[in-house]
Image: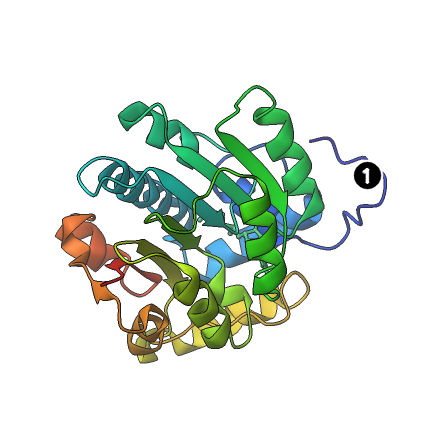
Amino acid sequence: MSDRAPGGIDVSVPNVARIYDYMLGGKDNFAADRAAAEQVVKAFPESREGARRHREFLGTVVRYLAGEAGIRQFVDIGAGLPTQKNVHEVAHEVNPHARVVYIDNDPVVCVHGRALLANSPSVAMIEADLRDVDDLWRKTLATRLIDPDEPVGVLMFAILHFLDDPGELVAEVRDRMAPGSYLGISHMVRRPSRAEDVERMSEIYSDAAPGFKARTVEEIKAFFGDFEILPQEQFIPLHIIARFSSLGFSSVARKP
Ligand SMILES: C[S@@+](CC[C@H](N)C(=O)[O-])C[C@H]1O[C@@H](n2cnc3c(N)ncnc32)[C@H](O)[C@@H]1O
């Protein structure tokens, strides 16, 4: 993206989707996003590699769900700007008939997503906000790609830490998922050893996401409710878990 502002976008304010795009080496970002991302890297030098590892984890989870777990439909909430190995691409490598609904509340993300998906009848991109689950689910079902009675893989990767108190919202989504469904979550973690760095991160994100909040592992696990959490090491090598344990916590859980 050049630094000229397309209609309606204030590029002087950093944006979470574009900060992350920059971290991943993407081109859909502006000077304010890059400056914020560089500040994040100062606080967490491991965050650039962490973003890459995070995408690898997402891919591993989707491959497992579409394969071994037999999930044929996915809802990716807070999908972000298209990058390499998007959820539908990974799912289709395993099952070419898998259906995927991407959701984001950022209109620019949605425009990019729709452009990428123009010729993919089994994939949709919708603009909706996790803070309004009724509307989000109604739009999801309106795509006719998601059968509410069939197990679904719901992904909430790197979105919940941008919300002030999303516990109830996640519970509302869990309630709508059929038994045998899976929920994948990744989240910035708050550990006492990195308290100051996390504080710095909240300051950096204060323009882009005023509700930014890193949480303890226990707080993050609570988002799974009564779902059965699968061992993290099933998806991430132990040395990678150890290396990034002060940056984020990620896991997958199955609805009984
Ligand atoms: C850091 S990106 C994560 C992208 C992708 N899920 C991943 O982990 O690779 C977070 C995305 O969540 C979106 N987002 C933030 N708050 C949201 C909300 N309340 N509802 C829907 N999307 C939201 C942002 O627009 C952004 O695209």
Q: How far from the left and from the top, in percent, is residue 55?
A: 37, 42
Compared to residue 51, the image places residue 97 above or below, namely: above
Quadrant of the frame with the C terminus: bottom left
Question: Which residue sits at x=66%, y=49%?
Answer: 106
Compared to residue 64, the image places residue 12 above or below, namely: below
Question: Which residue sits at x=61%, y=49%?
Answer: 139
User: Given the current orientation, which residue lies at the most extreme right position?
Assistant: 7
Q: Which is more toward the observer, 217 or 31?
A: 217
Q: Is mark 1 within 8 Å of ligand 1?
A: no
Q: How far from the left and from the top, in percent, is residue 59?
A: 32, 38
Compared to residue 118, the image places residue 50 above or below, namely: below
Colouring style: rainbow
Q: How far from the left and from the top, in percent, is residue 14?
A: 68, 54
User: Given the current orientation, which residue lies at the most extreme bottom position?
Assistant: 192
* 115 horizontally vs 157: left or right: right
Residue 19 visible? The answer is no
Q: Quadrant of residue 164?
A: bottom right
Crowd class of label 1 (few under 14; some 14 to 19; many from 20; radius 10 Å): few
Q: Amino acid at mark 1?
A: Ala
Q: Which is more toward the observer, 121 or 18?
A: 121
* 194 horizontally vs 170: left or right: left
Quadrant of the frame with the N terminus: top right
* 56 horizontally vs 106: left or right: left
Q: How far from the left and from the top, in percent, is residue 160?
A: 48, 64
Compared to residue 210, the image places residue 176 above or below, namely: above
Q: Secondary structure at mark 1?
A: loop
Question: Which residue sits at x=21%, y=56%?
Answer: 241
Residue identified by numbered label 1: 5
- Numbered label tally: 1
User: Given the current orientation, which residue lies at the most extreme top position?
Assistant: 119
Residue 55 visible? The answer is yes
